[in-house]
Amino acid sequence: MRTIAELPHPDFKITIFAMNQKFIIKFEQGTLEQVYKIAEIDVTDGVDGVFQLVDTEFTQSVSARFHEMRQSFINAYNRHEY
């Protein structure tokens, strides 16, 4: 897997990788991460097409999902009182 690009974002780290004819878009926020894979053949402009996918609407949904993920983990952790 090789790193193609890193995109700036104030709330999380965005890294784009290439591996096995796929683009992998990885979002990281603290201990949580989300990964999306798309076949290179499905993106018309190569990595520029991936940049277009990572638009404001998409990053807002990623941010909301991070919030849901964090809340789910906190709820699970609290049920077991470590």
Image (cartoon, rainbow, N blue to C red):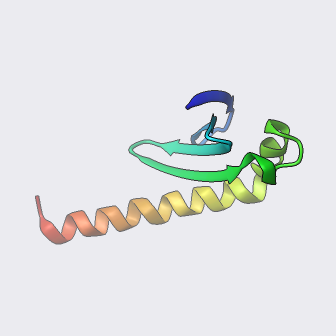
Quadrant location, the C terminus:
bottom left
The answer to whether residue 64 is above or below residue 11 is: below
Toward which corner of the image does residue 76 lie, by quadrant? bottom left
Task: Name the one closer to the observer, 47 or 78.
Answer: 47
The answer to whether residue 20 is above or below residue 64 is: above
Answer with left or right where residue 19 lies relative to residue 46.
left
**Residue that lies at the very extreme toward the front in this rendered image:** 20
Q: Is residue 16 visible?
A: no
Answer with left or right where residue 8 lies relative to residue 63.
right
Toward which corner of the image does residue 2 lie, by quadrant? top right
The answer to whether residue 5 is above or below residue 68 is: above
**Residue that lies at the very extreme toward the left in this rendered image:** 82
Q: Can residue 11 be seen in this view?
A: yes
The answer to whether residue 24 is above or below residue 77 is: above
The x, y position of residue 3, in whole percent, is 61, 28
**Residue that lies at the very extreme toward the right in this rendered image:** 45
- Residue at 51% of width from left, 57% of height from top? 66
- Residue at 88% of width from left, 48% of height from top? 44
The x, y position of residue 25, in whole percent, is 63, 45
Task: Name the one closer to the observer, 22 or 24.
Answer: 22
The x, y position of residue 38, in whole percent, is 68, 52
Quadrant location, the N terminus:
top right
- Residue at 72% of width from left, 57% of height from top? 58
The x, y position of residue 80, in whole percent, is 14, 68
- Image label count: 0
- Residue at 66% of width from left, 45% of height from top? 22
